[in-house]
Image (spheres, coloured by chain):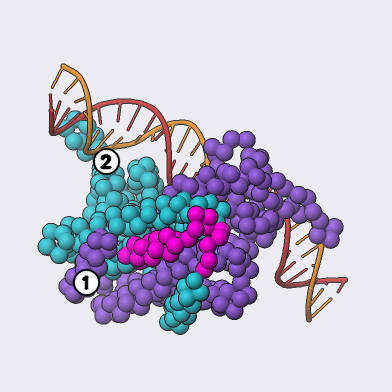
Chain colours: A purple, B cyan, C orange, D red
Amino acid sequence: MSTATLTTTSYAVLGLLAVKPWSSYELTQQMDRSLGHIWPRATSKLYEEPKKLVAAGLARSDDERVGRRPRTMYRITPKGRRALARWLDEPGAAPALEFEGLLKVFFSDHGTRDGALASIAATAEWARAQAEISRAVGEEYEAGQGRFTERQPQLDLTARFVTDFYAMVGEWAAWANGVVATWPDDPSRAVSDPSIGTETLRRARRAARR
Amino acid sequence: MSTATLTTTSYAVLGLLAVKPWSSYELTQQMDRSLGHIWPRATSKLYEEPKKLVAAGLARSDDERVGRRPRTMYRITPKGRRALARWLDEPGAAPALEFEGLLKVFFSDHGTRDGALASIAATAEWARAQAEISRAVGEEYEAGQGRFTERQPQLDLTARFVTDFYAMVGEWAAWANGVVATWPDDPSRAVSDPSIGTETLRRARRAARR
DNA sequence: TTCTTCATGTAATTAGTTACATGATTGA
DNA sequence: TCAATCATGTAACTAATTACATGAAGAA
């Protein structure tokens, strides 16, 4: 009953239920399309969390059938809308980033140049693929085919963030590839170009001044 | 004994041990300075993981004393260096991003404009503070005061990524603040400026073309 | 001498993932 | 009618976090 145990993931699902009712399977589809870019979670969570919301009185479940097979639809309650509004009033946490590929570049002086290049290439390809997803969704909305056009102002802000993020990652990977390509086989023997540090420092100063 | 159970966090610690021997406490300090930007982990992990490395034969521990108090120093073994090199040869995972603050902006049509502005302001301040940390470390290295100047080529690549990331987040927050400031109190009544979607799409196309 | 911060850990809890199971639908 | 994929879930496991505990060193 208490809302004390709800996690950010709970509220993420609650937020989707505020838009419209969904089954868990539909939630997993939406995870691929939108939520997964900023709050990625495994499929099983999307079967688990709605139950917790129901137990807390923030959602209710309806047993429907597809053919003869049962499926559960979830929809938000008035109490759920109030809980969501309270959550939205508190500032959210800052971005949290985990990047194993960069970790491998960071430690590349204990490996090979080709290993570092492989991580960078994988990053570049990932950034391109993600940008392609952004592009495809963007084209839909541009053509007026979007599924939630009434939420356009919110989508505008979110889409810009993820698009810029993927672009930034892609640009970094292209640049890093050029740098590492000039290294010898053994990266512990690579020599740093001083202008890189200078330019990075210039950017850091600028960003710290805002 | 088997290396099958090692996680990315294990290798992150192993990588640090390849640079030099550390105590767990020193590892926590280093987490604040460098590793935490790309692989953030709680302090207790840095006491736990080295033990797993020792159990696997990839590191060894030496009991030293500080005054009369014991403390454990960890150093990498030859087998550890080989395991690290193998790990570095496989491409690492793509960036994983979690961003609760953006989640709140995404669902802001179910809250208030001021709530959205608060999340954006918190993001802006965080980005500024992180950029300030990047700047401070950058100034040290620029002045030749860096602690690991022999790893400069690796630091160049990593520092550029995190600096650009913080700059991108800061620029997004400043822009988003301007957009949301024009919204009415009730964000579900906000009207989208079509030029935003057009520009985002332009950027997505560009990033998808690389 | 006492208080605070630094330093070094352990224990309890949990949020999340991976793996598994299985019925329904579709198309070859 | 068989195989593949869509759809709907549960169970087992684990990586990680939060909270706790405590000695040493340095400051007031």
Please name the predominant secondary structure of the magenta segment in the image.
helix
The quadrant holding residue B61 is top left
- Residue at horizontal 48 percent and vertical 60 percent from the top: B183
Tag 2, which chain?
A: B
**Image disc number at residue B63:** none
3D distance between C-alphas at marks 2 and 1: 40 Å
Q: How would you rate the neighbour count of disc 2 (Cα within 10 Å): few for under 14, some for 14-19, many for 20 or more? A: some
- Whether residue B135 is situated above or below residue A81 in the rendered picture: below
Task: Look at mark 1 in the image and give the residue it sits on.
Answer: A199
- Residue at horizontal 76 percent and vertical 54 percent from the top: A71
Does residue B4 show up? no
- Taking depth in this image into account, of A179 and A136 the one nearest to the observer is A136
Residue type indicated by callout 1? Glu
Q: What is the span of residues highlighted in magenta in the rendered image?
A: B167-192
- Taking depth in this image into account, of B4 and A90 the one nearest to the observer is A90
Does residue A16 show up? yes
- Whether residue B150 is situated above or below residue A14 in the rendered picture: below
- Residue A115 image offset from top left, x and y in percent: 36, 72
Task: Let me know if residue B169 is in the magenta part.
Answer: yes
- Taking depth in this image into account, of B128 and A191 the one nearest to the observer is B128
Q: Is residue A46 left or right of residue B133?
A: right
- Residue A27 image offset from top left, x and y in percent: 64, 58
**Image disc number at residue B72:** 2
- Residue at horizontal 60 percent and vertical 50 percent from the top: A14
| Disc 2 secondary structure class | strand
Instruction: Tell us which disc is closer to us: 2 or 1.
Output: 1
Q: How would you rate the neighbour count of disc 1 (Cα within 10 Å): few for under 14, some for 14-19, many for 20 or more? A: few
State the quadrant of the C terminus of chain B: bottom left
- Residue at horizontal 25 percent and vertical 60 percent from the top: A208
Q: Is residue B59 left or right of residue B183?
A: left
